[in-house]
Image: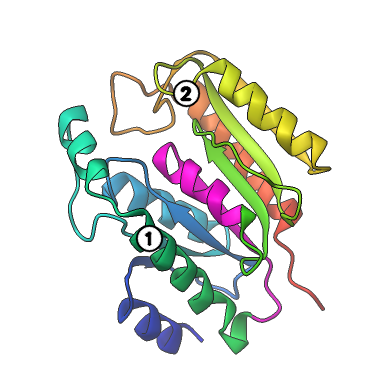
Amino acid sequence: MTTNLQETLQASLVDYLAIPTSAPRGSLIVLHAWWGLNNFIRSFCNRLAGEGFLVLAPDLYHGETANTIEEAQKLRSKLSRKVVEAELIQAMALLQARPDLARHSFGGIGFSLGAYWLLWLAEQLSVRLTASVLFYGARNGDYSRSSSAFLGHFAEQDDYVSAASVKKLQKALVSSGKQVSFHTYPGTSHWFFESDRPDAYRAGAADLAWQRTVSFLQSHLLISE
């Protein structure tokens, strides 16, 4: 399976693919933060592949990455909504159209900017996500027709995502009948999970968020018989 899939994806707009050594237990799309598809995201995808998941990471910046907030703001400002929407739909279609993945459930993980876009994906009827993991990102929307369960990891002190916006999102998801589990991590700020952001990274909170993420994905990304 892996050779044809890898060739197909690498010939597309998708920039990173992590493949488990054994038959995948489910398929994931991972959406990067405003830093871009950097080494942290690649390493994160590899960790997920080590847990048995096939992982696909689109590059919304098409090869560019940022190290500073100013650089990240500039890259984000150049994004075209129509282009991002089309690329994300194409990335999911590549996974879902593969006959060898037909028995898979599909999930997603998004960091900050990526969490915003993952929530957009969860709204789309053409994308059958069953599990969505959000890292410090929120978005207003209508999730009543989404098929996804939601896990959220949020910082206690966040200059980019307010507690009010997180509560509003949680309320919207719960009122839509979705399974929702949101966690706020004491003593953390935005990017607390990302080990390449030393000012924000908190190892204890990151380890707990990782454990919760893997458990959640194992529960919701099932291979049908």
Q: Is residue 108 magenta?
A: yes
Label 1 vs label 2: CA separation? 24 Å
Quadrant of residue 145 in the image? bottom right
Residue at 38% x, 78% y: name it. 9
* Labels 1, 2: front one: 1
Amino acid carrying mark 2 in the image: Val
What's the residue type where badge 1 is placed?
Answer: Lys
Expressed as whole percent of the image width and height from the top left, the position of residue 150 reads 68, 43
Number of marks: 2
Which residue is found at the position 44% from the left and 24% from the top? 203
Q: Residues within 10 Å of mark 1 (few under 14, many from 20)?
A: few
For mark 2, does the 10 Å Cα neighbourhood hold few (<14), some (14 to 19), or many (20 or more) residues?
some
In magenta stretch: residue 120: yes
- Quick check: 81 left or right of 70? right
- Tell whether 111 sits left or right of 225: left
Q: Is residue 190 above or below residue 212?
A: above
Q: Secondary structure at mark 2?
A: loop
Question: In the rendered image, is residue 73 in sight?
Answer: yes
* Camera-nearest residue between 140 and 116: 140
Q: Check disc 1 and report the residue beneath it.
A: 82
Instruction: Say which quadrant the C terminus sits in.
Output: bottom right
Q: Is residue 208 visible?
A: no
- Of pointers 1 and 2, the one earlier in the residue sequence: 1
Q: Is residue 126 above or below residue 207?
A: below
Q: Which residues are magenta?
A: 102-122
